[in-house]
């Protein structure tokens, strides 16, 4: 009896300790929201507080009035959703070909894809910019979308998953007289919804959060994505409360993903864990 | 070849794989392979402006040998990697072991530890710049409220690297925790019970049973985390830009700086290829690691 109660006490102590650590871990995001709601006078001071005396949405109003934040959000949403949709199609096709067909050039293609994983974007930034400029895409959302459609990690996840689709299923479809495309769309694809879920969430998150490439190819203030716009705001002398404004935009940048995370937590965690990108 | 073969069963059409893999292959050629080829060519050129370079043979590679800034950048890269990787893994492991027990509110706690993963590098960068702001930041305000003096955080070369390491560890512990949790759940409970019956204490069970069972996971996480650290860019770019001085200029920052701030495209390309060489070692290992990380889930 005393043994179990001692164990119960320890369990609650552990929970309390973990809760304290969790509070510390979540604090920066909490502080982002609090700072966005704090009037400039209080946030630009050396006073220690955890909740503003007079919470206000002025920071949001001000920054949305002075900067094209809606436009940035729209750009980000366009780039992330169109980019993800196209990229998932490309990855599914390539993954299917690599998993289920033997064809001339397959080994070469696979090896070539492998090599690109280890090339960090900083190395190819200038040449990739040259290619994009030659195509006349600079400052267009397509400059962000096109070069990131080839997603080697996505292709690997797709291939890995499709290796698990039974060959018998595909053969059966052929016996029934289905063509190649019909087999893929009617038989293979319907077994792949968990894969599509992981690819969509991962692809959307990476595109929504992407920074360096959009920074290089987008120039006009109106065509920026949220992360790039956010980076232009720090220490902007045009604001009376720059940090409040910055935190307001940061909040707007994080909230959509936070919602996706809370709704699709399992797929989300699985996706990030299975690729180890970021 | 004909798509209309009369007699069933249909033969697999020869064109099909090319149609399925075609878009990926074309995009790969245009936006991956071509830039890499151009980058290699650039590394043998001296070019300040885009396009019209002058061929200089291996001069850029020779410059690297005597470049004191490159030595600084490599040293900073080692410091940053050694500072972030084991710390994030140790905290992740501790959290995973704690959260593997039946605790009240376990699901919520797991989600909370994972939340920082969702934030973009830029967002993390601006939040942390604000928190560690020397004048109005909540970190120094809290220290003052406790009667302690403030720290210079990002504004002093002596503390900037440490501050960055703390921030990056913060973004990484959720990932390490999730991978470790997956591995812990695959350790049979009977094993732990048997050890307990044999009189092993909690620490002994952790040390002699859990840690060895987790060894494959630990090696996977080690490789993944090293690759993440070598490629960490956004947070450093936003928080310090490699400064103050060159105290937080890691290799990838130096590549970026050479290309864009110093306009030495050829040299930047050569530096980039050095980074690729370093990454090559870890990426070959990472291939295996990623696949095994998947199996653990």
Image: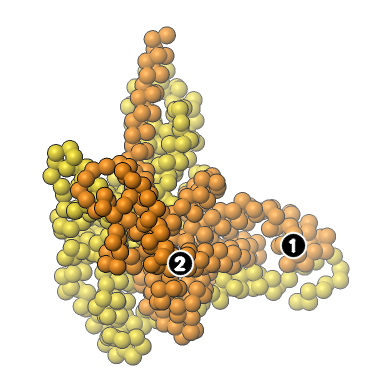
Chain colours: A orange, B yellow
What residue occupies the far right of the structure in this picture? B7
Rounded to the nearest angstrom, the CA distance separating label 1 from label 2 is 41 Å
Give the number of the disc on residue A72: 2
Q: Which residue is at a point 51% across and 45% down the rendered structure image?
A: A262
Same chain for the residues under marks 1 and 2 in the image: yes
Where residue B38 sits, quadrant-wise, is bottom left
**Residue closer to the observer: B165 or B90:** B165
What residue occupies the far top of the structure in this picture? A1
**Residue A254's spot in the image, x, y percent?**
43, 54
Residue position for label 1: A183
**Residue A221's spot in the image, x, y percent?**
40, 73
Q: Mark 1 lies on which chain?
A: A
- The 10 Å Cα crowd at callout 1, few under 14, some 14 to 19, many 20 or more, is some
Where residue A26 sits, quadrant-wise, is top left
Residue B242 appears anywhere in the view: yes
Report the quarter where the N terminus of chain B lies: bottom right
- The 10 Å Cα crowd at callout 2, few under 14, some 14 to 19, many 20 or more, is many
**Residue B136's spot in the image, x, y percent?**
22, 52
Q: Mark 2 lies on which chain?
A: A
**Residue closer to the observer: A7 or A254:** A254
What residue occupies the far front of the structure in this picture? A54
């Amino acid at each position: 009896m005393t043994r179990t109660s001692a164990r119960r006490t320890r369990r609650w102590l552990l929970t309390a300790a973990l809760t304290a650590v969790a509070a510390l871990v979540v604090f920066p995001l909490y502080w982002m929201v609090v700072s966005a709601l704090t009037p400039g006078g209080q946030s630009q001071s050396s006073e220690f507080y955890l909740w503003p005396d007079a919470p206000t949405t002025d920071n949001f109003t001000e920054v949305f009035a002075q900067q094209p934040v809606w436009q940035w959000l729209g750009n980000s949403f366009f780039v992330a959703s169109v980019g993800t949709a196209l990229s998932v199609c490309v990855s599914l096709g390539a993954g299917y070909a690599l998993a289920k067909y033997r064809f001339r050039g397959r080994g070469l293609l696979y090896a070539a894809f492998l090599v690109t994983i280890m090339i960090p974007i900083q190395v190819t930034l200038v040449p990739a910019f040259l290619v994009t400029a030659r195509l006349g895409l600079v400052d267009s959302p397509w400059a962000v979308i096109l070069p990131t459609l080839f997603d080697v990690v996505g292709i690997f996840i797709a291939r890995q998953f499709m290796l698990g689709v039974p060959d018998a299923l595909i053969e059966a479809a052929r016996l029934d007289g289905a063509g190649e495309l019909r087999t893929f769309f009617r038989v293979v694809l319907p077994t792949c919804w968990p894969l599509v879920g992981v690819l969509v969430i991962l692809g959307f998150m990476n595109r929504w959060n992407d920074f360096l490439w959009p920074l290089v190819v987008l120039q006009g203030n109106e065509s920026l994505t949220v992360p790039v716009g956010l980076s232009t705001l720090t220490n902007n002398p045009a604001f009376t409360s720059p940090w409040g404004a910055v935190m307001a935009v940061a909040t707007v940048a994080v909230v959509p993903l936070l919602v996706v995370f809370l709704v699709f937590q399992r797929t989300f965690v699985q996706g990030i864990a299975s690729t180890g990108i970021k | 070849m004909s798509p209309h073969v009369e007699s069933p069963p249909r033969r697999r059409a020869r064109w099909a794989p090319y149609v399925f893999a075609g878009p990926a292959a074309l995009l790969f050629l245009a936006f991956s392979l071509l830039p890499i080829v151009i980058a290699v060519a650039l590394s043998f050129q001296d070019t300040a402006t885009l396009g019209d370079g002058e061929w200089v043979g291996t001069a850029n590679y020779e410059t690297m040998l005597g470049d004191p800034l490159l030595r600084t950048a490599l040293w900073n890269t080692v410091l940053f990697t050694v500072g972030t990787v084991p710390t994030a893994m140790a905290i992740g492991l501790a959290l995973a072991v704690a959260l593997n027990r039946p605790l009240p509110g376990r699901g919520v706690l797991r989600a909370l530890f994972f939340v920082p993963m969702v934030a973009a590098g830029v967002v993390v960068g601006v939040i942390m710049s604000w928190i560690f702001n020397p004048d109005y930041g909540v970190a120094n305000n809290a220290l003052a409220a406790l009667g302690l003096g403030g720290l210079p955080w990002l504004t002093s070369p002596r503390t900037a690297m440490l501050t960055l390491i703390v921030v990056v560890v913060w973004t990484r512990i959720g990932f390490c925790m999730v991978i470790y949790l997956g591995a812990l759940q695959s350790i049979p409970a009977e094993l732990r019970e048997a050890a307990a019956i044999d009189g092993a204490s909690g620490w002994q069970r952790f040390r002699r049973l859990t840690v060895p069972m987790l060894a494959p996971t630990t090696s996977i996480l080690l490789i993944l985390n090293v690759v993440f650290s070598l490629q960490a860019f956004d947070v450093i770019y936003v928080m310090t830009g490699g400064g103050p001085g060159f105290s937080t200029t890691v290799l990838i920052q130096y590549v970026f700086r050479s290309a864009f701030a110093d306009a030495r495209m050829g040299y930047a390309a050569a530096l980039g290829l050095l980074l690729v060489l370093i990454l090559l070692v870890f990426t070959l290992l990472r291939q295996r690691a990623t696949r095994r990380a998947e199996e653990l889930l």
